[in-house]
Amino acid sequence: MIEPSTISTDILDTNNPPAEHDFPALRDFIERATARRAFLDDFIDPLKVEFDLLREERSALEVEIRKHERAVSPLRRFPTELMSEIFAQAVQPCEILKDSSNSYFLDMQSGPWLLSAVCSRWRGIALSQPNLWAFLPLNFRRRRSTLERVAGTLSIVQAHIDRSQNAPFKLIFIPSYTTRLLEVEQDVLGRLIPHIARWEELVISGTPALYKSLATRSASTGFPTLRTLAILVHKAGNEGIRNVFDSCPRLEEVFFNMESKDNTPVDFYVDTTILRRYGAKNSWERHIDVLSNANNLVDCVLRFTFPFRPVLTETKIQLPHLSRLAVIHNKALDFLEAPALQELYCCDHLPELYDQLRQFPSLQKLFVGAPPHSVTVDLDSFMHSVPTVTSLCVYLPMNSAPAMFKVLRTSSTTIQQNQDSTSDGLPFLRTLALCIGPQSSTDIGGPLNQDELMHAIETQWRRGLRSLHIYVAKFVPSENTLERMETLRQQGMHLVLEKHALQVYQRMVEPDFRLYTDSYDLSEAMMGFWNST
């Protein structure tokens, strides 16, 4: 180290000129510091070389350490059987097979192609598992604007066909257009149709040419392994669809025109021998054709083409095993006998609904839409028509809110006096969802009585309610309301103030049983779009 400079910082840190007597000290420091710097450079240069060597050695060790760490990784020691199961879970189609709007498309950047690109062991495992290659998502409509990306689809499809061996196919085939098939789509279909006996799960939206090809190739064999069918028939493709899937002895699930905006009934027949799940939009007559022989049906979703005109039947349709039902018009309930029904999702809230609900003694979960504009509902009768329900979701106009709150907070003694009942309405209620809003965009209604609301919620909490989701149009909770809600949360209640009516619907109704496919449809139906009828 050298002696520090004696020159003032007023000179060193500024542009002020030094005095004459400072120059000797300045020159002396420059000479001493320069010599010291040269000494340090001579000392550091060899150290730089040594440092570079040490850094190279460290980098090499880092690479070797990572290799050895991977070698002792538990994943490396997983048995092939376990890895195969993990791979199967990673590429399974899950619920997307029921959704013809999904954007999945077969390519080499996902699924088994991605897994097999990791290392030789993973590739060997992937290639040894035919089921990994049996999922073929081909939604050309979602790639219509980027058809250059599907140029290699034919070779990829052929690779899947070869590598899947005899494994049953899970297939999505959605053409780009509703009236014709593109050349690449025809080529792909030509590769798949010879293996029609392997089709186990199928999502398809077609053209007349497509259905004609399927009908021709399946005429002799049918679809011997088909278990799940989701089909969207466009008006232009209605022709020739009726008997395409009439020979499916293992068919368990059918989802037909569930997302269609078209109101044209479709003459469509399927084998219902062992059918367990059925969801469709069609005319009432077409639904009857399916339901009349579907004795093993467990889940059912009925949407209707307009106008809805139910045809009287001599006897009710017997559905002894039906557990879950979604239906837009509750008039259809008059024609169904379903003693085992546990979940019901219906959109009409009319007075006759109460008698209809009493025919379901095992009902546990209920969704009911808003009543028509001109109808005043009897909420006391409604509550007492479903005494076994544990989960309830109700849409109500704003002017019905006071009556609902009164029913929810009324003691059993009062109810017994007024209703000649021996118990509270909904004594087993554990989950409640309320959506309170206007019946039109200009009918907001008066302010909500927040004290009545909280009194009703607190009463139900004491009776056993444990979960509440609530939406109120134009609702601004007071400080007192927020404090009372927070108290309930601290006591264990799951209480959520929803920001949108659609959120209530989505939380309380599983995707398979949603009667509407977008928020516009829902808001129109739930908030009284039919009030002019």
Image (cartoon, rainbow, N blue to C red):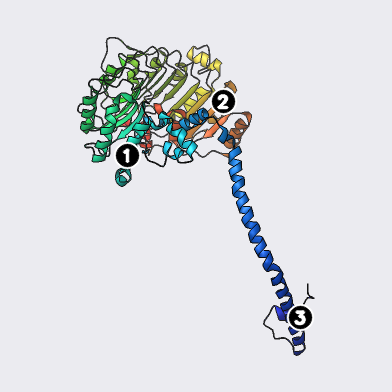
Residue ID for mark 1 = 155
- Amino acid type at mark 1: Ser
Kind of element beneath mark 3: loop
Could you tell me which quadrant the C terminus lies in? top left
In-front residue for pair 503/423: 503
Could you tell me which quadrant the N terminus lies in? bottom right
Report the side of 462 relative to 278 (left or right): right
Report which quarter residue 319 is drawn in: top left
Say which of marks 1 and 2 sits in front: 1
Q: Earlier in the sequence, mark 1 or mark 3?
A: 3
- Residue sitting at x 64%, y 53%: 58
Q: Is residue 528 visible?
A: no
Residue 466: mark = 2
Say which of marks 1 and 3 sits in front: 1
Report the side of 223 relative to 408 (left or right): left
Task: Please give the count of numbered marks on the rendered protein.
Answer: 3
Residue ID for mark 3 = 7
